[in-house]
Image (spheres, rainbow, N blue to C red):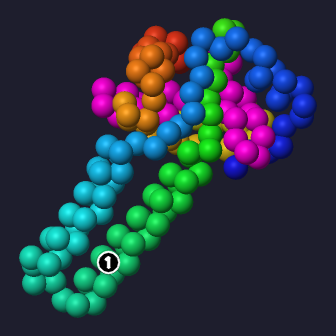
Amino acid sequence: MLQGAGASENRALDVMSAPFSFSLLYSRSLWWAAGLAHLLPLLCLGASGVPGWARMVVLGGVLVSAGWGWRTARCLRHLRMAWSVSGEVWLRAPTGDAQIEILPDSIDLGWLIVLHWREMNSQSTGRAPLTRDALAPEHWRALRRYLRWSRPEAD
């Protein structure tokens, strides 16, 4: 996901005085919502007269989706984001640090924030769903404030 960064970038992230930084943590409410979203199609199949082959297709799709979500969640839990005073946003991962840009299509629904970013060097993108229980209250408020007032508008 991230390209290895030089020692100067690592030092910059360690010593900068960020207005806020946070690690992406386990979210119980997000796991419940994802579990329910994967369980509902299976319950609907049990209540309908769907042929056996179609049930297997839906079951396969639900299993692939659940596996992909689990894999994504495991990758995201090792990330840390930091906002510098100058407005730079950094993403720290086990593979290295990268400066990122928060994209305008990041959304804040009040109970859920979906961050969408692009790495400045590699131009690869990433997304992270965040709920209130995944961040400390002061980080949640700071992130919502940033998304509302500090980022560029969508086209």
Q: Residue furthest right?
A: 7
Percent x, y of residue 79: 62, 40
Determine which residue is flagged by label 1. Answer: 59
**Identity of the residue drawn at 41% across and 64% down:** 66
Camera-nearest residue between 109 and 96: 96
Occupied quadrant, residue 10: top right
**Identity of the residue drawn at 25% across and 83% down:** 55
In the rendered image, residue 60 lying in the magenta stretch gets the answer no
- The number of discs equals 1
Tell me which secondary structure the magenta stretch mostly adopts. Answer: strand
Q: Residue furthest bottom?
A: 52
Percent x, y of residue 42: 22, 72
26 on left or right of 4: left
86 on left or right of 129: right
**Identity of the residue drawn at 25% across and 57% down:** 36
In the rendered image, residue 98 lying in the magenta stretch gets the answer yes
Up-down relation of residue 69 to residue 127 (above or below): below
Percent x, y of residue 46: 14, 78
Up-down relation of residue 18 to residue 34 (above or below): above
> What amino acid type is highlighted by mark number 1?
Leu
Occupied quadrant, residue 132: top left
Camera-nearest residue between 102 and 93: 93
- Boundaries of the magenta span: 87-115
Q: Is residue 52 visible?
A: yes
* Element assignment for label 1: helix
**Identity of the residue drawn at 70% across and 11% down:** 17
Q: Is residue 105 visible?
A: no
